[in-house]
Amino acid sequence: MPEIAKPRILSGMRPTGRLHLGNYVGALQNWIQLQNPYESYHFVADWHMLTTDYASTGELQTDTREMVTDWLAAGLDPSKCTMFVQSRLPEHAELHLLFSMISSLGWLERVPTYKEQLENVKDRDLHTYGFLGYPVLQSADILMYKPYGVPVGEDQVPHVELTREISRRFNHLYQPVFPEPEALLTPSPRLPGTDGRKMSKSYGNAIFLSDPPEVASKKVAGMMTDPARKRRWDKGNPDVCPVFDFHKILSSTEVVERVNRECRTAEIGCVECKKLMAHSVNEFLDPIRERRRAFEQNPNQIWEILEAGTCRARVVAQTTMNEVRSAMNLVHK
Ligand code: SF4
């Protein structure tokens, strides 16, 4: 029986080095689940990194290797999905350039993350041509593979909308080449950092997938709890406690129910609650650490997997660019 083609999806991640539990829950977990029902493409968005971190490229290769090691250790399987590096495919730059000709400035200035980052990022000058245009580059990354959908968090939905807009304009001006991909909203339960803020490498509040057990346990022991619960006998409120957010994601139903009940009556203290938490975190991370060790012993394997994925992606990218050049009359006849 002929194999039925799976719908294609595509998603990328900036190379930020080792990944933390927030990255896992926010995106990676979803990628791993989608690699069976979909034909998945996942790329290292290194050119995107340059739109904000253009002045510090020294760690780019190390960060790429570390991040992809975490992808693989967490369960992305190169026999099921295609992993590649954006900058290895100049076709993305060409499509970005062609899309930039038909993308209205108004569209880009209205992208909410553009305004937000201009206001919030103070340690770098983001008033650059590249930064304004990064959603166009993202549209090129996506449309190159003509995917059915793009798994994204809520904040990325406007980018997918822009991609659809660019697709429509291209198809209207030249020839119908591109689909209008759907935003596949990623369910991402709240997983705060150890200080209760959003988990982020730059806040120093992250638990990394590669943290050794003693490091992870120490971080859990230092986690913020319900601020109103000052003494052991004070009753707590797990609904405002970051430790409980972790339990809900990583602990068994039995432990979650126990903590939810005994915290409110002060039967369980925060020290014991955190010990249970550390156990759950380490139990979850153990198989990831083990797989990571195997990849660390042979780092060349990471580059080989990326090279094989890049070759597969190139076939699709070249086919799309042939169609694009022909639709725009950029081919000598
Ligand atoms: S017992 Fe657990 S859930 Fe309750 S405040 Fe302490 S750490 Fe948080």
Image (cartoon, rainbow, N blue to C red):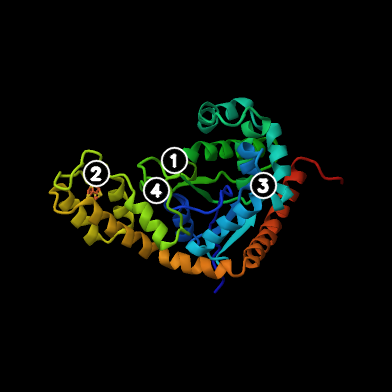
Of discs 4 and 3, which sits in the foreground?
Answer: 3
User: Cα distance, mark 2 to mark 4?
Assistant: 17 Å
Location of mark 4 (residue)? 188
Q: Which mark is residue 58?
A: 3
Within 10 Å of disc 4 (Cα), the crowding (few <14, some 14-19, many 20+) is some
| Label 2 beta carbon within 8 A of ligand 1 | no
Q: Earlier in the sequence, mark 3 or mark 2?
A: 3
| Label whose residue precedes the other's in the sequence (1 or 4) | 1
Question: Circle 1 is placed at which residue position?
Answer: 154
Quadrant assignment for the N terminus: bottom right
Comparing 87 with 181, the one in front is 87
Q: Residue at x 66, y 29 (%)?
A: 128
Give the amino acid type for the residue marked by disc 4 in the picture.
Ser
Residue at (43, 48) in percent of width and height = 206
Return the x and y of residue 158 as percentages of the image width and height. 51, 36
Give the CA separation, mark 1 to mark 4.
9 Å
Badge 1 amino acid: Glu
Q: How far apart in space, not on screen, are marks 1 and 3 (Cα)?
A: 31 Å
Q: Nearer the viewer, residue 194 or 254?
A: 194
Q: Where is 190 relative to 165, above or below?
A: below
Mark 3 element type: loop
Along the polypeptide, which appears first: circle 1 or circle 3? 3
Q: Which residue is mark 2?
A: 239
Dividing the picture into quadrants, the one containing residue 234 is top left
